[in-house]
Amino acid sequence: MTDKARLHDRYPELGTGSLPVGPYIDPAYWEAEKKHLFKKTWLHIGRVEELPKKGSYMVRDIAALDASIVIARDRSGEINAFHNVCSHRLNKIAYQPYGTTRKFACRFHGWAYDLDGSLSGVPDEKSFMEGFDKACLGLSKVSCDVWQGFIFINMDPEPAQTLAAFMEPMYGGLDGYPFEKFTACYGWSTVVDANWKFALDAFQETYHVAYLHGRSIADSLAQNEEGMLHPIDGLCGDVHRRLSIAGNPNTVYGNPQAATSGLTQSSVSGSADIGNRIAAKALAAGAGGTKIDLSQVTLPEALNWTKHPHWAFDINVVFPDFYLSCRPNYFQAYNFRPISHNKTLFEARVYYPEMKTAGGRFYQEYMKVTLRDVLLEDLATLEMTQEAAETGAKTEMVINDFELMVRHQAVVVDRIVEAGLAADAAALAAE
């Protein structure tokens, strides 16, 4: 793709007009999103490595689902999900974010449940009334499945499509990416007073980079002849979307081979700027620092699908709120968990291969600080955007061609919400 081609030309169904602000600030619209979108689709909630052995469990309290969910690995090694609600008097059965247990036990009256959610123990069982059947009183199951080591749940007991059918049309080409070779190196979480769509929008376009990130990573992305930071290409599916980004290989952030073999000294090493000098040291010190030889890993064809010579990374937005950025040497996994119409829980994790040298650890620590600062810059604008939207001064947003992903998200969400509201109206009319 060249800058003369328009991304929008490929997706005329998305339109080219301004986007309404209402869905970002309307509490009623948020309630419709909860009912018709979040409670009906697959949601990423963690990695299989977070449940390393039989009996491992984690708890996710998800406001968009109005639920607390327990995810556990049972004795056969299978991963199950169920509501964190006892069948007796509705107390919780898991009380810590993570843990390991043989059984779940309610602290209120001692009812016990196996790792698959079945009810296994009831104190003074004989005192319950006729017809009492433990087999019918297990924990309420939640649909659960795994894709590429990522755990997903779906609140619909009979999802409209399997997780594989949900993921494969856009992301089947990622088969073979070495997700399992990377470990969670660091992460952050924070609550931002902004709508979840505003938050995610800030991460799925490059128009802002030259300005918001002018002092951090702007020089890490490739510029065109006019000095603009346009993406290489973008793809929109039925609900998911992808964006491919070119980088400056003479920078740490923009070099997809950093910390792997065959890396040369950065050309910025002679710079008088201390930040660039430290960056150059990190780039050089990290070379060959990984315990696994990533040069021997064959990356899937779906990465850098245009075969751009200066490709740096791909952004994959898994609908509705999961951001997965893949590079040859690490990946970023972000969730934008809505709490209310104007509040979002942002959770970020960055996964690297284990390092074998001090230089490799130095590279990781440099990247940790760099990514932290970039995230702080991204998050800094969101609350101001929300406040401005809620003034009502503007009722529409203007979108350029390279902000296609922002448009795609808005159109897809609105399509699903409107269909749900129409179904509700039809059901009410039929009563």
Image (cartoon, rainbow, N blue to C red):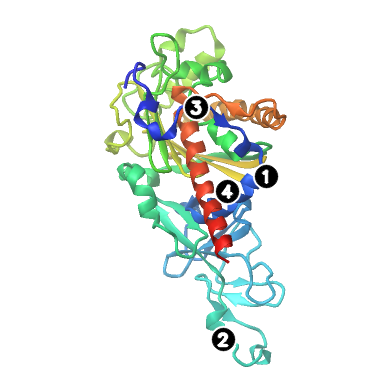
Q: Quadrant of the N terminus?
A: top left
Q: How many marks?
A: 4
**Type of amino acid at the residue the image marks with label 1:** Pro
Residue of label 4: 33
Q: Earlier in the sequence, mark 2 or mark 1?
A: 1
Q: Earlier in the sequence, mark 3 or mark 2?
A: 3
Tell me the quarter of the picture where residue 136 sits: bottom right
Q: Earlier in the sequence, mark 3 or mark 1?
A: 3
**Type of amino acid at the residue the image marks with label 3:** Gly
Work out how far the residue at label 3 is from the one at label 2, CA to CA, in angstroms. Answer: 59 Å
Residue of label 3: 17
Query: Image height check: is 421 above or below 99?
Result: above
Q: Position of residue 325 (x, y in %)?
A: 44, 35
Q: Is residue 280 left or right of residue 106?
A: left
Q: Is residue 108 left or right of residue 223?
A: right
In front: mark 2 or mark 1? 1
Work out how far the residue at label 2 is from the one at label 1, CA to CA, in angstroms. Answer: 42 Å
Q: Nearer the viewer, residue 135 or 281?
A: 135
Q: Which mark is residue 27?
A: 1
Work out how far the residue at label 4 is from the one at label 1, CA to CA, in angstroms. Answer: 10 Å
Residue of label 2: 133
